[in-house]
Image (cartoon, grey):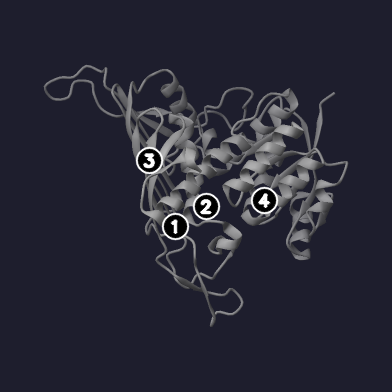
Amino acid sequence: MMKELRVGIVGYGFIGRMHTIAYINIPLYYDPFPADIKLVGVCAASQASCSRAMHQAGYEFCTTDYRELVRRDDINVINCCAPNYLHYDILIEAMKYGKDIYCEKPLAMNVAEAREIVQLAKETGIKNQMTLMYRFVPAIMRAKQLVEEGFLGRVFSFRAAYLHSGYTDPKRPMSWRLDKSQGGGGALYDLGSHILDLVRYLLGDFESVYAMTETFIKERPLPNEPDKMAKVEVDDISILMLRMKNGAIGTLEASRLATGVNDELRIEIHGSEGAIRFNLMDPNWLEVYDNRDKSGPIGGDRGFKKIETIQRYPKPAAFPGPKFSIGWTRYHIASLYDFVTHIIEDTPTSPNFEDGLRVQEVMEAAYKSAEEQSWISISSI
């Protein structure tokens, strides 16, 4: 008989709805699908959100108190889609009740919290995974293969960025993402966590960081009182210089003020034998340069080539097919499918809480570097 996974999702805002869509679609995208997934309960911020969740997605019940989810015997998986400041309490409570956990980034508000979470996960033995879903873009999966095959040779440098433009309007109201006490950090936490994880996924651990952060829009109107202003204490833009343990050096930018972009995640890596580059706004392709190609007076065979990765996920991915263009929702479906499969097969998850902690350490070191205006060793955090 197929194992049943009974899911409770904490948070039914934008990302909670995205996780809901992913769970619903796993049986449609994978054949055979790994488990019978039931959306049992959802914790939402208001009764109006509760009604919407039950009507839209068919949850069996809704609550405004996450404890009602984690303490129920008929729920064995908890998805944490709550604001950052709630992660620690939700995860600790869920682990005490033996729930497997899928958690949005960042793992916690700071390294101290993240370490406690990782330690309890080890003690309880629960399955845990982070929503660092860009690892599950086929182009990034192919890039990982190439790196492991030695395609790049000795890695010299990288350039990475995750750019949004959604906060360029100074009239955009204050929110928890702009409140340090609730978000923990700004653009670096919100966007930088994703791109830091990708760099680490492809190139290994970080050694040290030198960072500069800036808050350009220092006040924003309160959401329900537009005539009153609140102070913004988190970064609009963070720029990092990074040294890797493998000797490579690189730069990383996280910005929510990148006018003219939408959802632009870029990564470019240069090595002695080749180079790779990727842009999330052109997600069907991985660009590669092979230094082994024959050169000639006017170029020979050398140049960047586009590998068509499109939706070429390995089996049992079966829908909509490998030739169709890919998009943001698909990465979430692939990431959650991976998590569910590890639960069913009782195999190690990745990216897990440990990976989330490694990212948290770099972000905390970056903020310390920006404050002290000096290089900070990641191992000192």
Q: Amino acid at mark 4?
A: His
Q: Quadrant of residue 147?
A: top left
Mark 3–mark 2 distance (CA, rounded to whole Å): 19 Å
Q: Three-letter amino acid code at disc 2?
A: Asp
Q: Nearer the viewer, residue 22 or 208?
A: 208
Q: Tell me the quarter of the picture where residue 149 sits.
A: top left
Residue carrying label 3: 242
Disc 1 and disc 2: Cα gap in Å?
9 Å
At mark 1, the secondary structure is: loop
Q: Position of residue 323 (x, y in %)?
A: 50, 30
Q: Amino acid at mark 1?
A: Arg
Secondary structure of the residue carrying tag 2 is helix
**Separation of marks 4 and 2 at Cα, in angstroms:** 14 Å
Other residues around mark 2 within 10 Å, as few (<14) / some (14–19) / many (≥20): some
Q: Pick whichever, 334 or 161, lies toward us.
A: 161
Q: Which residue has dot 4 on it?
A: 87
Residue at which label 1 appears:
256
